[in-house]
Amino acid sequence: MRNVPLARLVLCLIPALVTLAVALRPDLGTALTVGATVLASLAAALALISSRRGISGSSTGQHRDTAVRRGILALDIEGFGQPSRTDPDRAQLRTHLHALLDHALATAQISPSQVAARNDLGDGILVLFDPIVPAATLLHPLLTDLTTRLAAYNQTKPAPQQRLRLRVAVHDGYVLADAHGHTGEDLNHTFRLLDAEATRTILADTRSANAVLIVSDPVYRGIVRHGYQGLDPAVWQPIRIHAKETRTRAWVHLPGLTPQPNVPIVLAAPAVGPASLPIPRELPGSI
């Protein structure tokens, strides 16, 4: 009943009320009929106003035609489908990844209402945040907590197939909601960073690392470079990203490693200059 507008209930009840009143007081029949007509007109007006408010204020459609700027976090489990892993191994990795994320969100004091979307990707997770959540918070304390607990978890798992190693991408940009979920150029950009061969290579070649973090050039320049949330820009290195239609610079960090291993020279990018970088034609002579 609570979903039925009050005005519609009034419209339905007016005829019955008038009939009852006339039966009890026949001498008031004309006055009651006029009063009922006025009430019906008012109820119809209220119903129209209510329906228009429902259309304009619907929570499901309020952002359908407008992109919203959101913090974007994407996580992917390295080698999720490798043959040495069994399905129970994969299930355990997925379970622990979600547990790590739950704890990190709580540590960062990000409430469920501030998570606009959390999508399970099978071998990873995509999280979109409410605009009220600063992108800097995703790097610290959220990812600081997640990678610290990830390292502790891996210390208890000597078997390689049981270790959880992650690629993690952070971007901040405009995302459009549609009937099927979310889309947008900035969302595509996040996944290009996450899935780039350079990102995969850096993690694969650093066996002591538990994760590689990669942030977009705008996130580095707008947040990391300024040291917000206590971030140290000196431990981030620029790399070239060449993935599908994307040619850009991004920045990587391997949490827990001191000093940071240098990225291979063929993957390194200049720290300044155009973000759209050409594809290297050949390896440098020193490789």
Image (spheres, rainbow, N blue to C red):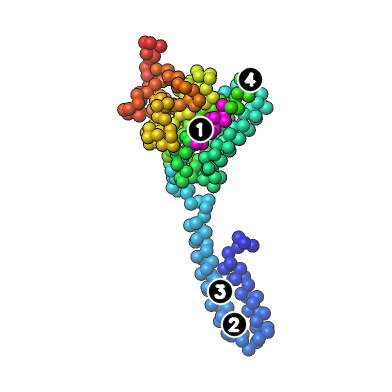
Mark 3 and mark 1 residues within 8 Å of each other at the beta carbon:
no
Q: CA distance from mark 2 to mark 1?
A: 72 Å
- Name the amino acid type tagged 1: Thr
Q: CA distance from mark 4 to mark 2?
A: 84 Å
- Name the amino acid type tagged 2: Leu
Precedes in sequence: disc 2 or disc 1: 2
Precedes in sequence: disc 4 or disc 1: 1
Q: Residues within 10 Å of mark 2 (few under 14, many from 20)?
A: some
Viewer-nearest of discs 3 and 4: 4
Precedes in sequence: disc 3 or disc 4: 3
- Circle 2 residue: 32
Residue 150 lies in the magenta stretch: yes
Residue 115 visible in the shown view: no
Precedes in sequence: disc 3 or disc 1: 3
User: Left of 261 or right of it: where is 180?
Assistant: right
In terms of secondary structure, where does tag 2 sit? Answer: helix
Q: CA distance from mark 3 to mark 4?
A: 75 Å
Mark 2 and mark 1 residues within 8 Å of each other at the beta carbon:
no
Magenta segment boundaries in residue numbering: 141-151
Viewer-nearest of discs 2 and 1: 1
Measuring from the top left, give residue 46's x and y in whole percent: 52, 68
Measuring from the top left, give residue 83's x and y in whole percent: 62, 20
- Name the amino acid type tagged 3: Ala
- Name the amino acid type tagged 4: Ala
Establish if 14 lies above or below 180. Answer: below
Q: Quadrant of residue 150?
A: top right
The label on residue 144 is 1
Precedes in sequence: disc 4 or disc 2: 2
User: Left of 79 or right of it: where is 223?
Assistant: left
- Circle 3 residue: 40
The label on residue 159 is 4
